[in-house]
Amino acid sequence: MKILSSIAIWWHTLGGVEKFFWAVALLFSFMFVVQTVMSFIGGDDDGTFGDSDDYVDGDGGIDYQFFTIKNFITFFTVFGWVGLACLQGNLPMLHVILWSTLSGVIIVLIMFFLFSRMAKLRASGTLQIQNALQKQAETYLRIPGLRAGYGKVHIRVQGSLRELRALTDDDDDIPTGKPVTVIGIVNESILLVTSKTKI
């Protein structure tokens, strides 16, 4: 009770502007902590503050957008604490609002840049099997002729060595270790190859 009483007395001694910044700082700091904990345990805030990664206007063309709930919470967390720091420094109100807003925007821009880069790295690491067309590969497991069954090839695509299933229209089986050329894509994970050299 003494603690609550002390808090109440402290709160009543604050001015209106200080109350505003303290309310913003404490509320959004709490939301930030909950959001962080939920992301670590895999919940990602779906049941608390909505999906943190919802995109504005449903634009699915960008992997990470500027206007998300995560960025909103981060902006006001920084806004509140920087505002309090500026008030403690007895800065003019115009400067308090300016520095609080600017600090929040800068932090969100940094987050936007970092997460956008991470999204691009994930996308670049995803295999685009069309990039295997006309590339050289080496048979890893025998490929039966006339598409009688699947074999496997080792092929370097997008800078990394991959093992993919393969078919062939060649009359004869293609033995292990035989160089082949990718001449077609059967589906998202199967290549069409040939051991015949072009004339």
Image (spheres, grey):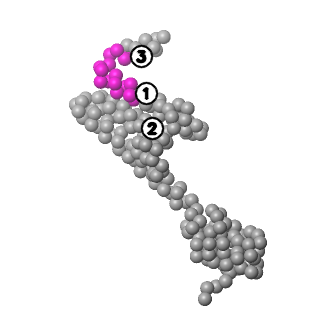
Decide: is 136 above or below 83. below
Side of 29 relative to 13 (left or right): right
The mark that comes first in sequence, 3 or 1, is 3
The mark that comes first in sequence, 1 or 2, is 1
Amino acid of disc 3: Ile
Q: Is residue 134 magenta?
A: no
The residues tagged by marks 3 and 1 sit, at their Cα atoms, a distance apart of 16 Å
Q: Which residue is mark 2?
A: 69
Residue at disc 1, secondary structure = helix
Q: Nearer the viewer, residue 161 or 57?
A: 57
Figure quadrant of residue 20 = top left
The answer to whether the residues at label 2 and label 3 have Cβ atoms under 8 Å apart is no
Q: Which residue is mark 3?
A: 7
The residues tagged by marks 2 and 3 sit, at their Cα atoms, a distance apart of 30 Å
Q: Nearer the viewer, residue 118 or 133?
A: 133
User: Is residue 3 at all visible to an observer of this figure?
Assistant: yes
The picture places residue 151, in percent across and down from the top left corner, at 73, 70
Q: Which mark is residue 27?
A: 1
The picture places residue 2, in percent across and down from the top left corner, at 46, 11
Residue at disc 3, secondary structure = helix
Figure quadrant of residue 169 = bottom right
Q: Which residues are magenta?
A: 10-25
Image point 57% across, 59% down: which residue?
A: 126
Amino acid of disc 2: Ile
Image point 38% across, 43% down: which residue?
A: 107
Image point 57% across, 67% down: which residue?
A: 130
The picture places residue 132, in percent across and down from the top left corner, at 59, 70
